[in-house]
Amino acid sequence: MSFKKWSLIAAVMLTSVTLVACGSKSSKSSSSYTTTGSTSGTYQAVIKNGRYRTSKARGVAVQQNDNTYNLKSFESGLTNIIAKKFFSTKSYIFQEGQYLSTSTVTNWLGRKTSSNKTGLNPAKGSSSNPNPLYIQQIEEQDYLQQSGSSMKLKGVVIGIGVNSEYQYQKKTDGPYYTKSISKAKGEAEGKKAAAIILKRLRKKKTLKNVPIVIALYRQAGEDSLVGGTFFAYAKSNSSKISSWTSLNYKNVVLPKTSTSSSSSSSNTGTSGSFSNFKSQIQNFFPNISGVTAQTQYKDGTLQGMHITITTQFYSQTEINSFTNYIASAAKKYLPSGVPIDIVIKADTDVQAVVYRNSGSSKWLTHVFDSY
Amino acid sequence: MSFKKWSLIAAVMLTSVTLVACGSKSSKSSSSYTTTGSTSGTYQAVIKNGRYRTSKARGVAVQQNDNTYNLKSFESGLTNIIAKKFFSTKSYIFQEGQYLSTSTVTNWLGRKTSSNKTGLNPAKGSSSNPNPLYIQQIEEQDYLQQSGSSMKLKGVVIGIGVNSEYQYQKKTDGPYYTKSISKAKGEAEGKKAAAIILKRLRKKKTLKNVPIVIALYRQAGEDSLVGGTFFAYAKSNSSKISSWTSLNYKNVVLPKTSTSSSSSSSNTGTSGSFSNFKSQIQNFFPNISGVTAQTQYKDGTLQGMHITITTQFYSQTEINSFTNYIASAAKKYLPSGVPIDIVIKADTDVQAVVYRNSGSSKWLTHVFDSY
């Protein structure tokens, strides 16, 4: 593991942070770019005049999404699964999207109408059988490199979230109907939108020649307890996409409910480990603890787990003891070799976290305390 | 730092956990005691037949306390400040109090009346000028050592929480009045209660000869944003307390409000560090972040900080960037040599934690993510 490396990186980054402190007070020159610093395996991000460079389309995603799992999963996946394939965290600096504005993205996510010619979703059609909204979210991420006193754009990553279902009413206050959108249809609509978006981006002077990576994400349904997954990406240096690369990710919520559709053989190992872990924990207190997990697989191989344990605590000493117990049980029962975190909650308050980072075999614990 | 040591301890503990797994399924013998395992510097705790040995007075504290800061601070302090002085985490195993039951503690915390002769608080007196409730909470902790296949009680720690104020109504539905309880009066009442409790404990056969440590805690007022502090403790091997040792702890909330009573010179250094840290962070996003801290001093020396940062995030990438920035700023601005944790929240949800453990110089970060 790389705590040592992290300390080193952090130490190096502090130089930059010092520059912010001075720069933001004394001058507002155009070269007052600095970075956030970074922990191992994450990107530094751009700070300008002491302030984070927020996305030009800030807040659009928040407005558009009901299921917050989709939101976190889409943005994390775009960074960790897609961007890192092309722009290493060591050489590139992350910047929130600066070329697509709130109004642009809002218009693109709308339906194509006479008043919204850039809409990527089809006109509604008949209200009793409307065309689905296919394109649910669009995110831009910029990747830069330092060049003298300025930052140069070296690549853009665009994520497109495509719906797997569409909910609509036939009349106001009427019941809700749901249309499923097949994988094939979603993929076709996503690729169609990607081609249009790429052409539009190439019309912007700054984006004429930079590499643009576009990735397609299938949104999870509204009731899902886990987000969707990226299923294809393409890199282009022109205004056309010559070929797409497929991705085979799958998210599974544990324990599986009886209504879970498929019992994929690829994850019985994890499911079994989790089940042992869960039964070990549930009887720790007289009041039963809720234990659930989000798991992600790539080509049938486990990539990591987010586990949530909810129980009622009657004292801080119970929280301390439970956290130690979880750390022991995690080490004994949970799969090795992948990042896992376990959030320990009382009602909605996080009381402690037990986690093992990517590439590490050490379990770390932190209990939230108070003076 | 002792991650290596922790791994070792955890590995050793897993043997115990294995025993639980077998013991709880196949047998219910009286010797099926195991432990939770432990991370560095924390106690292992007792598990019996696969189940945590909860306190016999479980839940009493929860019922009695309005200010949850007092609750966490009292229980943590009793373990970390008092118990660890006498019972090292390496040699002793923690057990939630088994000798004081819910009804016993509830009665002791009540007023002394003809129907509650064991009440430690005075009779109410006149309703227009009632006697305060002095004794607010009582907690028992047991410390054991393994002896063959059984666990032997080696010591008991009792915490007594004494109020610093008393709120009352002169008539039902009337306005609330508050009486302050001076430090001297609180100390006298706490010591009086301690002497009575010790005598009562010595009447129990099992507690006749074990060392008993009693510690006194002054509760923070109801509106406080930090809990109270322990101010005295005594160890006794008999049924009398021969002498008390004073403790000089002080909790300070930062930033200081203009109504903060005293501007102690002892903590201007920390207050200044925190103020730099805070101003560095507050302008990171266009929307201002709230930054507050609980700090604790012993004899004027900083013991640690719990920092909470609340801001609005519009994306997971903002959370990632902010967390990296906090880690850099913490390293640059916050005092070294003491444990510090920084909880990063959006509304009430914890999004990330940045912390440095006791005895370590490494800052660790964990971002809560979702698939």
Image (spheres, coloured by chain):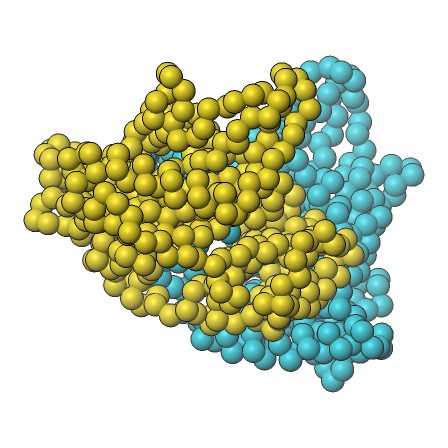
Chain colours: A yellow, B cyan
A160 over B27 or under it: above or below: above
Of residue A317 and residue B312, the one placed in the foreground of this image is B312
Give the residue displayed 37% in from the left and 16% down from the top: A115
Q: Quadrant of the N terminus of chain A?
A: bottom left
Residue A230, how many percent across, how many down?
A: 44, 51
Give the residue displayed 11% in from the left and 44% down from the top: A150
Of residue A109 and residue A47, the one placed in the foreground of this image is A109
Q: Is residue B269 left or right of residue B30?
A: left
Residue A120, how many percent across, how many down?
A: 39, 31
Residue A225, how many percent across, how many down?
A: 60, 46
Give the residue displayed 73% in from the left and 68% down from the top: B47
Tell me where residue A67 sits by quadrant.
top right
Residue A110, how many percent across, how many down?
A: 42, 26
Of residue A129 and residue A29, the one placed in the foreground of this image is A129
Give the residue displayed 50% in from the left and 75% down from the top: B7
In this figure, what is the number of numbered marks?
Answer: 0
Q: Is residue A145 left or right of residue B17?
A: left
Tell me where residue A139 sits by quadrant.
top left
Answer yes or no: is residue B35 visible. yes
Answer yes or no: is residue B349 visible. no
B298 over B319 or under it: above or below: below
Instruction: Residue at the far right: name it.
Output: B115
Instruction: Residue at the far left: name it.
Output: A148
A161 over A271 or under it: above or below: above
